[in-house]
Image (cartoon, rainbow, N blue to C red):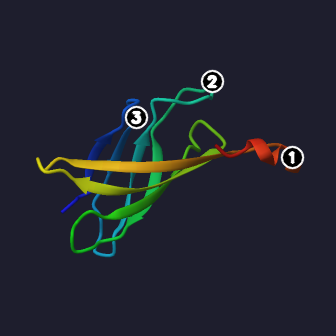
Amino acid sequence: QCDLTGWWENDLGSKMRVYAVDSQGNFSGEYYTAVSSTQKPIKPSPLLGSQHLDEDGQCTFGFAVNWKKFSDSMAVFVGQCFAGDDGEEVLQTAWLLREKVDSLPSNWKATR
């Protein structure tokens, strides 16, 4: 059974801490990004998410991160938790980042 609670680290050195997952699959935590295009100091950012709890334990999940402490952007992540044969849990995710732009004509460059 994959348990999202605890600390996770990705290949780029960013870290995420997920607090307790409730009985409905909802969770909160903090994201500590190791990468950013901002010139401001990076600070831990709040995250809110939900996971689909199922029988085999290899759950799907999603969460949003608000970079409000140092940037005018938000990111959303979706993924799945896999339990390997050795018992190690691995999260595979994809993400979108939305940056604030000053005008509608600039909208094309706002999402990565």
Q: Amino acid at mark 2?
A: Gln
Considering the numbered disc 1 on the image, is that residue within a helix, a strand or a loop? loop
Using the rendered view, name the quadrant where residue 20 is placed. Answer: bottom left
Q: Which residue is mark 1?
A: 103
Question: Of callouts 2 and 3, which one flags the residue occurring earlier in the amino acid sequence?
Answer: 3
Q: Which residue is mark 2?
A: 39
Compared to residue 99, the image places residue 57 above or below, namely below
Q: Amino acid at mark 3?
A: Ser
Image coords of residue 41 (percent x, y): 54, 26
Of tags 2 and 3, the one toward the viewer is 3
Mark 3 burial class by Cα count in 10 Å: few <14, some 14-19, many 20+: few
Front-most of residues 56 and 70? 56
Of tags 1 and 2, the one toward the viewer is 1
Compared to residue 56, the image places residue 100 above or below, namely above
Using the rendered view, name the quadrant where residue 27 is placed. Answer: bottom left
Residue depicted at x 59% and y 36%: 70
Direction from residue 84 to residue 102 in the image, left or right: right
Direction from residue 82 to residue 100 in the image, left or right: right
Q: Which residue is mark 3?
A: 14
Q: Quadrant of the C terminus?
A: top right
Residue found at the very far top of the displayed protein:
39
Compared to residue 31, the image places residue 51 above or below, namely below
Residue depicted at x 45% and y 30%: 34
